[in-house]
Image (cartoon, grey):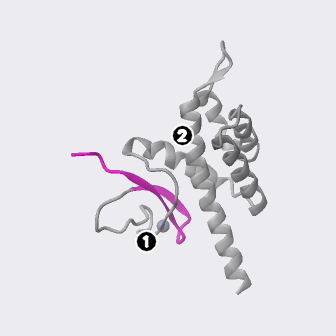
Amino acid sequence: MSSPRYVPLHCEGCDQTSLQPIEPGIAAVCSVCGARGSILPGEIYTEADVVAFEHLAALVKAARLNARNVRHVIAELTKASAGAAAPELPLLQVLELIPGLHFLLSTLCLDRASGGYDATKLRRTGGMLLVTVSAQLRRIEAENAARAS
Ligand SMILES: [Zn+2]
């Protein structure tokens, strides 16, 4: 039996972003409140990614970024995933806005001797951050739309 695939789910009800397994014929629901969430476009994950993903999602949510900063973070992460020569530089910009992510410096960067970083992990983490920050943008846009109507 193959292990289930996981997709990012954002719940508009409680603003929770989580990874949920895809099961044929079963709609994914929010793990916190049970409401039906929206599946976010992005990568497919496995169960091994759940802890790291939900940790990042909680930190991004806790940062309560405003619309301007959310767009800035998305732009930086997009740069990083687009194959920038030094993908750690956009990440450092992101850390300025989300200080909770500073622990990433020790997990991704750096082998101090070489000054290098784990490029695979960096790309993976950047992808997760992009998904969770995009969820925050959806929340902000939904709030703005509700205010305008
Ligand atoms: Zn929920």
> Which quarter of the figure is the C terminus placed in?
bottom right
How far is mark 2 from mark 1, CA to CA? 26 Å
Image spot of residue 74 (x, y percent)? 69, 53
Depth check, mark 2 against mark 1: the one in front is 2
Amino acid under disc 2: Arg
Q: What residue is pinned by disc 2?
A: 124
Q: Does the magenta stretch include residue 9?
A: yes
Q: What stretch is highlighted in magenta?
A: 1-20
Q: What residue is pinned by disc 1?
A: 36
Apparent side of residue 50 relative to residue 129 in the rendered image (left or right):
left
Image spot of residue 46 (x, y percent)? 39, 45
Amino acid under disc 1: Arg
Q: Does the magenta stretch include residue 101?
A: no
Residue appearing at x 74%, y 35% in the figure: 89
Residue 114 sits in which quadrant? top right
Apparent side of residue 55 relative to residue 148 in the rendered image (left or right):
left
Q: Residues within 10 Å of mark 2 (few under 14, many from 20)?
A: some
Residue appearing at x 50%, y 49% in the figure: 54
